């Protein structure tokens, strides 16, 4: 029979069960976190890869290098076709790398840099689609978020010693590089 003296604690009482925490890090399954990052990486990465293939190959109703190059020239960029190739490769390769979780901070930075330029082109059209920049802003934020958080457990990066243990510093440095590169490209724009 349990003692009713004041020295008895709830932890030693056979009728009191420990309270399970329902919030905070202990309540979140690491697998749920990793599955969420995988979903985000796949959708964002494959979307960007599809956009890049529109620019490079004319797939999915895209303009190919010539059509995209004309758009870049009309948007004030020099050497439209060269810019189309750079943007197409950045979106395709960055998107595929993001999807599989390969060098995730750099892949995220590639998307951030490209999308900052896309935002600059659509900026005058307001916020909402079809002429606004909400879509581009969402893709930019998603790519930056993945660069900062890392790819999660279900990624190729888990097998690369240098980036296996993702650090916030890697993500911050990559996002800064993406923003700086975007700034340099924007300076070339008329």
Image: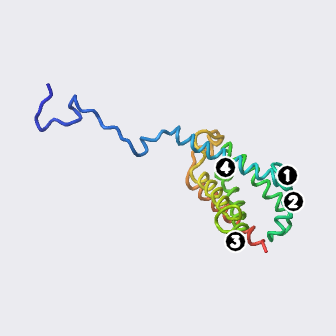
Image mark for residue 44:
4
Tell me the CA gap for discs 3 and 2: 22 Å
Disc 3: which residue: 124
Tell me the CA gap for discs 4 and 1: 20 Å
Q: Earlier in the sequence, mark 3 or mark 1?
A: 1
Q: From the viewer's perspective, tell me whether residue 2 is left or right of residue 159.
A: left
Q: Are marks 2 and 1 in contact (CB under 8 Å)?
A: yes
Q: Earlier in the sequence, mark 2 or mark 1?
A: 1
Q: Give the structural element (helix, strand or loop) at label 2.
A: helix
Tell me the CA gap for discs 3 and 4: 24 Å
Tell me the CA gap for discs 2 and 1: 8 Å
Q: Give the structural element (helix, strand or loop) at label 1.
A: loop
Counting other residues with Cα less than 10 Å from the Cα at mark 4, is it few (<14), some (14-19), or many (20 or more)?
many
Q: Earlier in the sequence, mark 4 or mark 2?
A: 4
Counting other residues with Cα less than 10 Å from the Cα at mark 3, is it few (<14), some (14-19), or many (20 or more)?
few
Would you place residue 168 above or below residue 131 in this image? above
Image mark for residue 67:
2
């Amino acid at each position: 029979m349990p003692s009713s003296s004041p020295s008895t604690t709830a932890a030693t009482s056979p009728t009191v069960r420990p309270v399970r925490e329902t919030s905070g890090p202990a309540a979140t399954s690491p697998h749920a976190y990793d599955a969420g990052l995988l979903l985000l990486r796949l959708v964002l990465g494959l979307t960007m890869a599809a956009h890049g293939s529109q620019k490079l190959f004319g797939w999915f109703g895209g303009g190919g290098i010539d059509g995209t190059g004309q758009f870049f020239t009309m948007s004030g960029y020099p050497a439209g076709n060269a810019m189309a190739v750079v943007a197409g490769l950045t979106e395709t390769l960055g998107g595929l790398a993001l999807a599989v979780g390969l060098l995730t901070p750099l892949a995220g930075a590639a998307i951030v840099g490209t999308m900052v330029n896309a935002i600059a082109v659509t900026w005058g059209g307001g916020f909402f689609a079809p002429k606004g920049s909400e879509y581009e802003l969402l893709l930019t934020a998603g790519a930056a978020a993945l660069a900062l958080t890392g790819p999660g457990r279900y990624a190729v990066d888990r097998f690369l010693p240098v980036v296996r243990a993702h650090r916030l510093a890697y993500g911050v440095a990559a996002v800064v590089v993406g923003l700086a590169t975007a700034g340099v490209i924007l300076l070339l724009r008329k």
